[in-house]
Amino acid sequence: MSTVFTESYAAYLFVILAIVMMICGFIFKDKGGKWLFYLSTFSWLMAGFYAFSVQASLTAYVHWLGLFCVLAAFGNMLMPIILRDKKPPVEPAKKMTSEEYTEMLRAMRYGKRSGYDKAGNKISGW
């Protein structure tokens, strides 16, 4: 009497491929290797499909293994989202004094006008 997974080595290969791609995804996540998680997701789904489609007397255990594979696929599918680069928090703007505010308004008003510098002062010239 043979066990369920010794009849075909496909499940072993899919699980090994999924684990290897998941480890490689963690190793190369900073170098653009997050697509390896999607390959691992596909491998987990194929192993789960094989576990659900096998006909044996140990269907309860095999179906639990299939459920584990499907849950691992969902986890791997979310890994690129979890590991993405997070933006730094925005620093709150400091309060401007009235002098700074008037300087900013002068710079906005006279900054590109000919004959005036950025502070709004008339340039000596003609």
Image (tube, grey):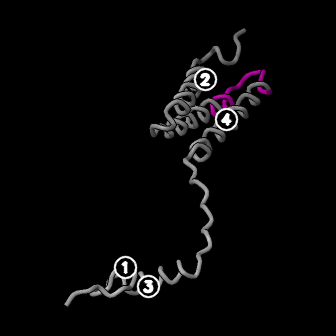
Please state the horizontal and vertical placement of residue 120, each as a whole percent of the image: 38, 85
Contact flag, marks 3 and 1 (Cβ < 8 Å): no
Residue 59 covered by magenta stretch: yes
Q: Does residue 107 appear left or right of residue 25 in this picture?
A: left
Residue assigned mark 2:
11
| Quadrant of the drawing holding the C terminus | bottom left
Q: Secondary structure at mark 4?
A: helix
Disc ID at residue 118: 1
> Which residue is pictured at 78% across the width and 21% down the height?
57
Disc ID at residue 106: 3
Q: Quadrant of residue 97?
A: bottom right
What crowding class fits label 4: few (fewer than 14 Cα within 10 Å), some (14-19), or many (20 or more)? some
Q: Residue furthest front?
A: 124
> Which residue is pictured at 56% across the width and 43% down the height?
80
What crowding class fits label 3: few (fewer than 14 Cα within 10 Å), some (14-19), or many (20 or more)? some
Report the span colored magenta. 49-60
Q: CA distance from mark 2 to mark 3?
A: 72 Å
Disc ID at residue 31: none
Pick whichever of labels 4 and 2 is earlier in the sequence. 2
> Which residue is pictured at 69% across the width and 18% down the height?
4
Eye-nearest disc, 4 or 1: 1
> Which residue is pictured at 58% across the width and 18% down the height?
9
Q: Amino acid at mark 3?
A: Arg
Q: Secondary structure at mark 2?
A: helix
